[in-house]
């Protein structure tokens, strides 16, 4: 057996377990073909770009968190800039780097802030029954374990710099919140692994998980937010709750980008 460093060992296991095996493998083996012939090519290119952006985003945020913890408050921005240059090798103009460092500091500062009672009241208003913004379940209970419990979901996750403000919060059910967890967007929800046969059976359609449907929901909403210059919240609300999945063209194998959602 060839010698592997501990790091290479992890890297190879990640690739084998998460990319090369099972139904996950199909997307990656078909990718070159899809780029060439499929109408999905623009979506797949957008997917790849966003996934890479997300990877870099998480790196800079992590570096920012580390810098804020290790520096004095007055030096935090300078320390973040140093991390960006020296550790992440991000070489950009100094004013752009300073702007990025300030943005990272702001994201680190708001991360995991609790939701103020006044903000909660502003989001929920005076209604007695709310709807989960993802699946449409009626929410009315205060009971901790009830599937009808009202809780607020950070649209951009709190742990990744999502502000605890009205514009970033909507009522969601427990199931959807657990499925979405702290994934930023559709890229991180493993949706690219999804692949259905032509004319999929009811059972096969039912095998699409809530997490994958939420990924699709966010994919549609984020694309709309970018195109129509809407906030993510407005784009999600205009879409409306919808987690029933259908295949757009039944005659071909369907991947993530070939699916549509309906209420
Ligand atoms: Zn829900």
Image: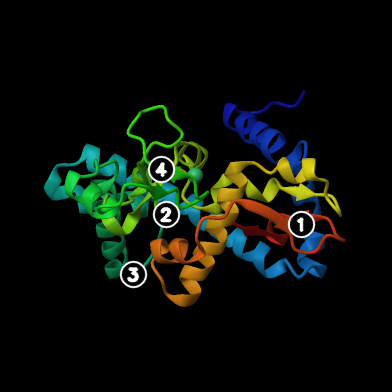
- Residue drawn 76% across and 70% down? 39
- Residue drawn 20% across and 48% down? 76
Identify the mark at residue 31; answer none if there is no mark: 1
Q: Is residue 112 above or below residue 245?
A: above
Label 3: element kind:
loop
Identify the mark at residue 70; answer none if there is no mark: none
N-term mark: 4 or 2: 2
Label 3, on which residue? 93
Where is the N terminus found, in terms of image quarters? top right
Label 2, on which residue? 89
In the rendered image, the residue lying farthest to the bottom is: 228
Tell me if 137 is positioned left or right of 123 in this view: right
Query: Ligand 1 near label 3 (Cβ, under 8 Å)?
Result: no
**How far apart in space, not on screen, are marks 3 and 4 (Cα)?**
49 Å
Query: Does residue 208 appear in the picture of this structure?
Result: yes
Label 2: element kind:
loop
N-term mark: 1 or 2: 1
Disc nearest the viewer among 4 and 2: 4
Label 4, on which residue? 139
Q: Is residue 157 above or below residue 262?
A: above
**How far apart in space, not on screen, are marks 1 and 3 (Cα)?**
35 Å
* Crowdedness near tag 4: few (<14), some (14–19) or many (≥20) residues, C-alpha within 10 Å: many
Q: Is 4 or 183 nearer to us in this picture?
A: 183
- Residue 21 in picture, x, y percent from top left: 76, 36
Disc nearest the viewer among 1 and 2: 1
């Amino acid at each position: 057996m060839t010698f592997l460093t501990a790091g290479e060992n992890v890297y190879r296991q990640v690739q084998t377990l998460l990319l090369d095996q099972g139904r996950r493998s199909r997307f990656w083996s078909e990718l070159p073909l899809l780029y060439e012939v499929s109408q999905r090519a623009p979506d797949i290119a957008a997917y790849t770009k966003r996934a890479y952006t997300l990877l870099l985003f998480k790196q800079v945020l992590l570096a920012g968190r580390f810098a804020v913890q290790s520096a004095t408050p007055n030096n935090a921005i300078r320390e973040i800039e140093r991390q960006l240059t020296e550790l992440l090798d991000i070489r950009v103009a100094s004013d752009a780097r300073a702007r990025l460092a300030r943005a990272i500091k702001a994201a680190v500062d708001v991360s995991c802030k609790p939701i103020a009672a006044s903000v909660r009241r502003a989001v929920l208003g005076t209604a007695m029954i709310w709807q989960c913004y993802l699946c449409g379940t009626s929410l009315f209970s205060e009971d901790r374990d009830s599937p009808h419990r009202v809780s607020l979901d950070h649209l951009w996750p709190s742990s990744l710099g999502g502000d605890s403000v009205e514009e970033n919060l909507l009522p969601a059910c427990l199931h959807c919140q657990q499925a979405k967890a702290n994934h930023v967007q559709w890229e991180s929800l493993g949706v690219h692994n999804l692949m259905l046969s032509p004319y999929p059976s009811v059972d096969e359609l039912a095998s699409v998980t809530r997490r994958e449907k939420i990924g699709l929901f966010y994919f549609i909403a984020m694309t709309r937010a970018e195109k129509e210059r809407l906030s993510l919240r407005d784009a999600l609300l205009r879409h409306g709750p919808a987690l029933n999945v259908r295949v757009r063209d039944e005659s071909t194998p369907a991947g993530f980008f070939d699916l549509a959602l309906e209420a």
